[in-house]
Image: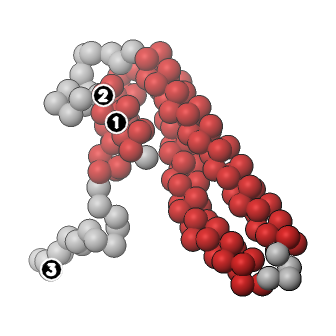
Amino acid sequence: MNELSRVLAALFPPDAPVLGKEKTDVSVVQEALAGVARRNGYIFAVLIAMIGILFVVDVSAVIWWSSQPSRAAAMIASSGITLPFLLYFLRDSWRTKVQADTLLVLAATLEPRVVRSVVKAFLDGLKAPDSKSRSRPVVKPA
């Protein structure tokens, strides 16, 4: 996610007006978003390959050290420690890729003036705290 927010912040600085007479160069936005999606697709493929390699190594360790269960258990435990981190990066990479693809489609279909406001709203959403930590507005009865 950090890469997507950095790319979007570079394209749309925080002090720029949200809607104005200035049109956004949609081709630049599309190239940047396509680069983010492509890069995260590569990262996603590498993470899938690493998970597959871990699985093969675990199965090989069980077969190879079937007479020494403690050694096989140590090998499986070491890969078990790595797996949650790989899954976290896999989820994060997939989320970023989907968000970049969504913005890419929006940038292609919306008017250039509207693209700026959509990207700014998206950036604000990336920086906003999660819904559990947001305080709810207090409504006073009339």
What's the CA distance linking mark 3 and mark 2? Answer: 44 Å
- Label 1 secondary element: helix
- Label 3 secondary element: loop
Where is residue 24? Give x, y as percent. 35, 18
* Foreground disc of the pair 3, 2: 2
Q: Amino acid at mark 3?
A: Pro
- Label 2 secondary element: helix
What's the CA distance linking mark 1 and mark 2? Answer: 6 Å
- The quadrant holding residue 74 is bottom right
Which is nearer the N-term, disc 1 or disc 3? Answer: 1
Q: Residue at x 56, y 39 (%)?
A: 40
Which residue was labeled with disc 1? 6
* Foreground disc of the pair 1, 3: 1
Q: Amino acid at mark 1?
A: Arg
Q: Which residue occupies the foreground of this view, 95 or 47?
A: 47
Q: Which residue occupies the foreground of this view, 113 or 140?
A: 113
Contact? badges 1 and 2 (CB < 8 Å): yes
Which residue was labeled with disc 3? 141
Where is residue 44? Give x, y as percent. 62, 45
Is residue 74 among what the camera can see? Answer: yes
Q: Residue at x 51, y 37 (%)?
A: 100
Image check: 127 left or right of 54? left
Where is residue 48? Give x, y as percent. 69, 51
Circle 3 crowding by C-alpha within 10 Å: few under 14, some 14–19, many from 20: few
